Amino acid sequence: MRKPAKTFQDLLVWQKAHQFVLEAYKYTNEFPKQELYGLTSQFRRASISIAANIAEGFKKRGRKDTLRFLNISHGSLEECRYYIILSNDLGYGETEKLKDILQEVSKLLAGYTKAIQNSVS
């Protein structure tokens, strides 16, 4: 049995989300310069939002508040899923690694959300 997380950094879902942010930054670094204020910026902001909302929700006192932040994180995750499709279709580089990490984050986030929903407050 896993010991309870003391900080958001102890959460496996946050660790994987952070890994996704780092990979998204590396990936978008190769985008054309004209995308700097477009797709590059949007992709990076959405990726950050996944991890940031997990972190912010971690310290919320009520289950309802925590779930609200996790819901925002889910939305940002799906936004990134679209940006991966778009950047692939635009020929901006190989997306398999990003897709794999995002899929893992998606599963972990769904599990974490379910655990919070089923927890006794």
Image (tube, rainbow, N blue to C red):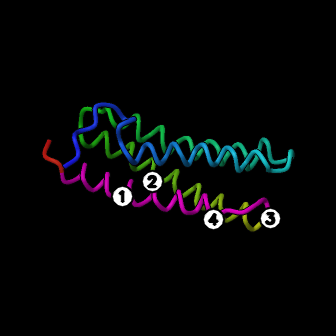
Residue behind mark 4: 96
The magenta segment:
91-118
Mark earlier in primary sequence (2, 4)? 2
Q: Check residue 92 in the rendering and tell me which mark sits there, or answer none.
A: none
Residue behind mark 3: 91
Q: Residues within 10 Å of mark 3 (few under 14, many from 20)?
A: few
Q: In screen coordinates, is 104 left or right of 81?
A: left
- Disc 4 is placed on an element classified as helix
- Frontmost of labels 4 and 3 is 4
- Frontmost of labels 1 and 4 is 4
Q: Is residue 74 magenta?
A: no
Front residue of this view, candidates 106 and 39:
106
Mark earlier in primary sequence (2, 1)? 2
Q: In screen coordinates, is 62 left or right of 91?
A: left
Residue behind mark 1: 110
Q: In screen coordinates, is 87 left or right of 74?
A: right
Mark earlier in primary sequence (3, 2)? 2
Residue 14 x, y percent position in the rendering: 42, 43
Q: Residues within 10 Å of mark 4 (few under 14, many from 20)?
A: few
- Disc 1 is placed on an element classified as helix
Q: Are marks 1 and 4 in contact (CB under 8 Å)?
A: no
Q: Residues within 10 Å of mark 1 (few under 14, many from 20)?
A: some
- Disc 2 is placed on an element classified as helix
Cα–Cα gap, marks 2 and 1: 8 Å
Work out which quarter of the rendered image holds the C terminus and state it.
Answer: top left
Q: Are marks 3 and 2 in contact (CB under 8 Å)?
A: no
Q: Are marks 2 and 1 in contact (CB under 8 Å)?
A: yes
Q: Residue furthest front?
A: 1
Cα–Cα gap, marks 4 and 3: 13 Å
Q: In screen coordinates, is 88 left or right of 70?
A: right
Hey, what amino acid is under mark 3? Answer: Gly
